[in-house]
Amino acid sequence: MQPRTYHNPVNGEYTSILKSSFETNGDYTHFEVSLTPGGGNPVHYHTGFTEEFTAVKGLLGLQLGKKIIYLKPGETALVPVYSRHRFFNDTNDTIIFRVRLVKGQPGFENFLKAIFGLVNDRKTITGNQIPKNIYHLAIVYKWGDTHLTNPLIKLCAPILNLLYKRAVNLGIEQQLLQRYCSSECIDPDHPGIK
């Protein structure tokens, strides 16, 4: 299959899914990110997969716990499950890097597709790209397995989990899948997450 590329017009980011979990029989998910100067994400962790970051072009900044490292093209860093981390670009040029998630993550793939789709449809709070719809927020929170370390967000996690269950029962998750996600990532027994 050809890589599927998604664009975020707010921050100029491009993400291409190079190999989906479906294509690797669940072994891994592989994607490439083009990140503009100043781009990045907040400190977070994942509970269901490790991440392997590889710089392709430019200098990729990574925060691993309290340590900051920079990867040059060809260099790799592994982020184990539950490790607090973030990526960033503090250079003056667009950088490109690849991320390999082990085991494959159809839920995270759907998270990427939905977030980019919601941004393009202007259904997010522009600066932070947070979905305006509380059910959409709960769904992408669950799909992405991306847990922010902000204490306020941690307090909201149980509420988001309840809202996710309600979104499933109301058919909102299915609507999001149909609108933004390809059928290859949809598990009929539990569509958002395998």
Image (spheres, helix red, strand yellow):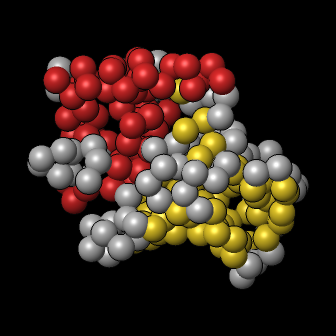
Q: In this view, does 168 lie above or below 101?
A: above
User: Residue at position x 37%, y 26% from top?
Assistant: 161
User: Residue at position x 55%, y 38% from top?
Assistant: 147
| Total marks placed | 0
Q: Residue 42, located in which quarter of the rendered image?
A: top right
Q: Where is residue 23 in the image (x, y as percent from the top left)?
A: 29, 73
User: Looking at the image, which residue sits at the far bottom?
Assistant: 74
User: Residue at position x 64%, y 53% from top?
Assistant: 83
In the image: residue 50, left or right of residue 58: left
Q: Quadrant of the N terminus?
A: bottom left
User: Is residue 151 visible in the rendered structure shown here?
Assistant: yes
Q: Where is residue 157 in the image (x, y as percent from the top left)?
A: 48, 25
Q: In this view, does 110 lie above or below 123?
A: below
Q: Where is residue 82 in the image (x, y as percent from the top left)?
A: 58, 51
User: Residue at position x 39%, y 37% from top?
Assistant: 142
Residue 66 vs residue 185, the one in the foreground? 66
Q: Is residue 33 above or below residue 142?
A: below
In the image: residue 38, left or right of residue 24: right
Q: Position of residue 29 (x, y in %)?
A: 42, 66
User: Looking at the image, which residue sits at the far left?
Assistant: 188
User: Is residue 127 visible in the rendered structure shown here?
Assistant: no
Residue 143 vs residue 113, the one in the foreground? 143
